[in-house]
Image (cartoon, rainbow, N blue to C red):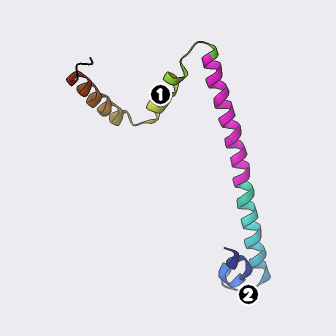
Amino acid sequence: MSDQLDNPRAVSGDNSGSARAFAHAQLKSIIERIERLEEEKKAIAEDIKDVYAESKGNGFDVKAIRTIIRLRKRDPNERQEEESILETYLQALGML
C-alpha cells in the first residue's frame, strides 16, 4: 500500500500530485472511520455487559439469557432441526 501512496500512477493512472493527495485523504478518512466505529463497538460492548449485570442483579440466569440470545440469532428451521436431533439422541440414551 505504501508503494501506491508513493506512486501516484498506481493510484489513478496519472502523474498529478492531486491523485496522491486524494489517496492520502481517502486513507486517512478510512482509518478515522474505523477508529470511530471501534470506539462505538467498545461502548456498545460495555452497555451489553451492563445489561447482563443488571439481569443478574434482578435474579435472572445470565448463562440462560446468553443461550436464548444465541438461539434467537439462528435460523428457526435450523434450530428446530438441531433440537429434534438432540431430543432423539437424548431419548436414545435414556436421558429424557
Q: How far apart, in angstroms, are the residues tagged by discs 2 and 1?
A: 57 Å
Specify start and end residues of the magenta stretch as a single range: 34-56
Q: Position of residue 83 (x, y in %)?
A: 32, 28
Q: Quadrant of the N terminus?
A: bottom right
**Image location (x, y in percent) of residue 9:** 68, 84
Q: Is residue 6 left or right of residue 76?
A: right
Residue at x-position 50% and y-position 29%: 69
**Label at residue 15:** 2
Q: Badge 2: few (under 14), some or many (20 or more) residues near its Cα, within 10 Å?
A: few
**Foreground: 77 or 62?**
62
Q: Main secondary structure of the magenta part?
A: helix
Residue 93 among magenta residues: no
> Upstream in the sequence, badge 2 or badge 1?
2
Image location of residue 62, percent across then percent down: 55, 22
Instruction: State left or right for residue 91 relative to residue 33.
Output: left
Q: As drawn, is 90 to the left or to the right of 28?
A: left
Q: Residue at x 70, y 75 (%)?
A: 2
